[in-house]
Image (cartoon, rainbow, N blue to C red):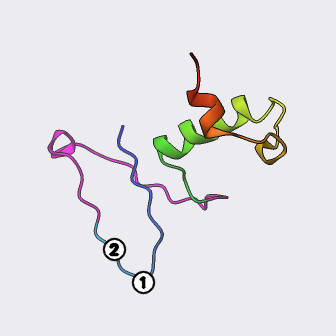
Amino acid sequence: MFIKTFIPTTGNHTIDIPESFFGKMVEVVFREMEDKPKSEAANQLDAITNRYSKFPKTDSNKHPFNRIEANDYE
């Protein structure tokens, strides 16, 4: 099976197929897709965002940070 996804910009396109299909009968089907396909990295980013967006957020501006006090551990 070979799938090629693209957005046509003109009326004439050439598709390069793998050599394993040479000499065989192939079927070409065109169908309109709803959305632009996402890359694997985008899918992983969405999964991470969904996983960690459920945790409560805190505003760190409400917590003062004193560097001298933080480094004075003796």
User: Is residue 11 located in the magenta-colored stretch of the structure?
Assistant: no
Q: Nearer the viewer, residue 57 or 66?
A: 66
As measured in the structure, the alpha-carbon distance from the residue carrying label 1 to the one carrying label 2 is: 7 Å
Q: Is residue 15 above or below residue 44?
A: below
Q: Is residue 71 above or below residue 17?
A: above
Segment colored magenta: 15-35
Q: Nearer the viewer, residue 45 or 9?
A: 45
Q: Secondary structure at mark 1?
A: loop
Q: Secondary structure at mark 2?
A: loop
Q: Quadrant of the C terminus?
A: top right
The residue tagged 1 is 10
Chief SS of the magenta region:
loop
Quadrant of the rendered structure where residue 66 is?
top right
Residue 71 % position (x, y):
56, 29
Q: Nearer the viewer, residue 20 or 39?
A: 39
> Do the residues bearing badges 1 and 2 touch, measured as CB atoms within 8 Å?
yes
21 relative to 6 in the view: left or right: left
Q: Please, which residue is most extreme toward the bottom here?
A: 10
The residue tagged 2 is 13
Instruction: Residue at 39%, 49% (x, y): give it.
Output: 27
Q: Amino acid at mark 1?
A: Thr
Q: Please, which residue is most extreme toward the front here?
A: 74
